[in-house]
Amino acid sequence: MYLIFDTLDATQVAQAQIDSNIVAVIAANEPEIVSDRGIIPRNLGTGQLDYEAQRTTTWCEPIQYGDIWYLIKPDINHPYFEGIDLCDGVVGCVEAMELPEIIVEEDAIAPEIIDVEVTEETTNE
Amino acid sequence: MYSLPFFGVTGGGQNLPIPTLYEYLETLNPPTAVPTIYEYLETLTPDESIIPSIYEYFNFTSLAININNPNKASSANPVDYVFTISRSTPRSVTTTVNYQIVNVFNTLESDFVGGMFPSGNLVFASGETTKTVTATIIGGAALGKRFAFRLLNASDSDSGLITTGDQIEVSYGEVPYFFNTVLWLDASDINTITATNNLISQWRDKSGKENDLVQATGSSQPTYSNNRVSFTSSRFLQITSKQVFANTTSGSVFFVGRQPTSSNGGWGRFGNNTTATLTPNSSGNFRESFLTNTVYTLTSIPTVPWPMPNSIVSFSNNGSQLSLWRNGVQVSSTSMTYSIPGTTHQRIGGNTADFDHQEILMFPYVLSESDRRLMEGYLANKWGLTASLPAGHPYKP
């Protein structure tokens, strides 16, 4: 599900609102993992907070697609977020199930593709 | 009289000609012709009938070692290594063989049951051609290690001591530590993964190069489940702080993973083309741009299944040739031009990806065939894929 906006400014406002909503939920359950530099991850092996590891700083960066901007609608599969509308307060967008085509990343260009037929190179070792 | 003739020493102040060996032997036994080896053997064994043939003489001491199970290049414990020692021909005599296990690299006595390196004697009874020795490893998970099973000496009951020096080496543990890797991601080592609600923000590099892959954006973070990290077109990890491949003109990548769905899902992007490299598509072909500017379509022979089940896949790029293997079988290769990826082109997942990764290894060079097979064996043993290796692969059980 996507949240589609007309402008980057509107997308950034929505981004901040969503992040605020998510942080509020996490802070209500695990306040120790919230810091001003992002959500502190846990080591999967030890379960301990890893203060040196990459933190989660936002739910979604604004993505440009043609003339529009969009965010991926928050959908976090965790009990903390059950029944909570993480888009509360987000305005100025249209929700859509799919974008017209495949997601194009910011640096994507048409690939140069060479078809190489190899018929005699196979070896069964 | 000749004095130290073989060293060319002069005698009596004059240079004397150095005799041939035959001439010298004649001086030691003047009236008798020098015997042949066969004649000499006859003098040692009165009963001519038991004189061995030349073939028997040079072969009855021959001992060979085979290892029943392949190198268990994994961290599983305990692991039994069964060595089979064979006598070259059935013989009516007994042969006693002394063996021992010795350290080659990092192996400790405490790695073995009993806390010491196994050693002992094997006695081949009359007519017996094979004996086995089982060595059980109980340690060694942490590092790549290597030991040697060595035959020290052997003696036949009728002819006495004979010497053998045969040995076979076994690698075990985390063998990537043997190599210079630039990136090593291991989903079985969950201490290397940090996540919030199973969304991964960092997968720590085990190569020692600190090439950790990260993702700060929640909606772009891959997910973890059961020793697998799942990537999609929008969920990826990357390193943008530095180049993983620098100051090199070749490289290799190994990974274990699968395409979970019927899509053209690729494994990642380590090339300057912005399109993700792809595992098999509906035609059973690979599209690959590992360390190149261009996406090459490699026709797979045999056709690789799509979606691809759990497989060991490796690519090598020697600067002019891109080659691909799957489960120890070379699938295809093509000529290409090497290119170090920029810092925005180093991703696992993303773009058109749809892939579950279990382990990823990258090397700043092309591995030799034996090392490639060792890596295949390590990954196959670790991830339960030995049955997928081809017959004759040195690490296939």
Image (cartoon, coloured by chain):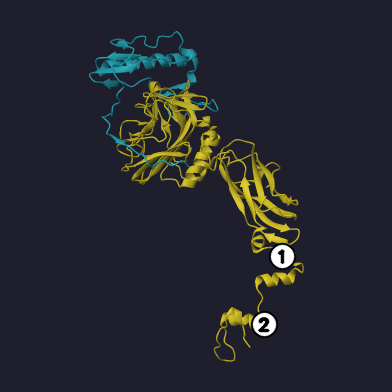
User: Which residue position is annotated with label 2?
Assistant: B28
**Residue kind at label 2, given as amino acid type:** Leu
Residue at the image position 59 percent from the left and 48 percent from the top: B169
Q: Few, some or many C-alpha atoms within 10 Å of disc 2 (few <14, some 14-19, many ≥20)?
A: few
Give the quadrant of residue A73. Answer: top left
Residue pictured at 29% horizontal, 24% vertical: A104
Q: Is residue B340 above or below residue A67?
A: below
Q: Position of residue B284 (x, y in %)?
A: 39, 30
Instruction: Give the numbered dot on residue B203.
Output: none
Can residue B347 be seen in this snapshot? no
- How far across and down, in percent of the image, does residue B333 sit? 37, 41
| Residue B68 or residue B233, whichever sits in front | B68
Instruction: Write down which chain is painted cyan.
Output: A
Which residue carries the number 1 mark?
B51
In the rendered image, residue A86, in percent from the top left (x then y), is placed at 39, 12
Residue type, mark 1 in image: Ile
Chain in yellow colour: B
Q: Nearer the viewer, residue B140 or B254?
A: B254
Asked if one can make out residue B90 in the rendered structure from this viewpoint, the answer is: yes
Q: Who is closer to the viewer here, B10 or B224?
A: B10
- Mark 2 and mark 1 lie on one chain; the one further toward the N terminus is 2
Q: Are marks 2 and 1 on the same chain?
A: yes
Chain under callout 1: B
Say which element carries label 2.
helix
Helix, strand or loop status at disc 1: loop
Q: Quadrant of the C terminus of chain B?
A: top right
